[in-house]
Image (cartoon, helix red, strand yellow):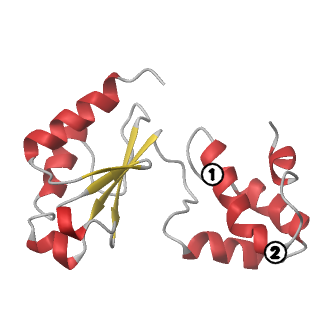
Amino acid sequence: MSTQELIRQFDPGQDNLLNILHALQNTHPQSYLTEEALEETARYLKMTKAAVFGVAGYYSMFSLKPRGRHIIRICISPVCEIMKGNSMIPVIEGVLGIKTGETTKDGLFTLETAECLGQCHEAPSMMINDKVFNHLSEERIREVITNFRSQKS
């Protein structure tokens, strides 16, 4: 489906901007919003490019650069920090062979931080795509990432 076809599934009201941006990002193989897609969205919604780019750049859920097929978000909230969440970041970086904000060479994973995943009662936590993993340990992280690596889709 083309960018135009995807966008036109939504009514051309500005209140659909976030829905359109999510749909565009979720269907892009590299999980990001291209400049062309944002420009097309601005035309369709009769908004300025600056307004659309501003929204896309403001929300941490959107990316303006290519990412991996699986987005790993590690919680860095104060509660997760108290529960040793920050010590999990080097573990994930070591398992993936990248630093936070980078994508693995095979394009499979991108590692990001999140201010809060809403899982304080089960910290430390991380999210891969839309699935949350709690009570993290080095062993649990290795197991989860290995399972994602072995998936075919």
Q: In this view, does 85 lie to the left or right of 101?
A: left
Q: In this view, does 46 lie to the left or right of 26?
A: right
Q: Position of residue 118 (x, y in %)?
A: 33, 69
Neighbours of disc 1 within 10 Å: few (<14), some (14-19), many (20+): many
Q: Where is residue 9 in the image (x, y as percent from the top left)?
A: 85, 51
Which residue is painted at 74% across and 79% down in the image? Answer: 51
**Label 1 near label 2: C-beta < 8 Å?**
no
Q: Name the residue under label 1.
A: 25
Q: Circle 1 sits in a helix, a strand or a loop, which is it?
A: helix
Say which amino acid is labelled 2: Gln
Q: In this view, does 38 lie to the left or right of 76?
A: right
Q: Position of residue 71 (x, y in %)?
A: 41, 48
Q: Where is residue 68 in the image (x, y as percent from the top left)?
A: 46, 42
Q: Which of 62 and 10 is in front in this view?
A: 10
Label drawn at residue 14: 2
Earlier along the polypeptide chain: callout 2 or callout 1?
2
Of circles 2 and 1, the one toward us is 2
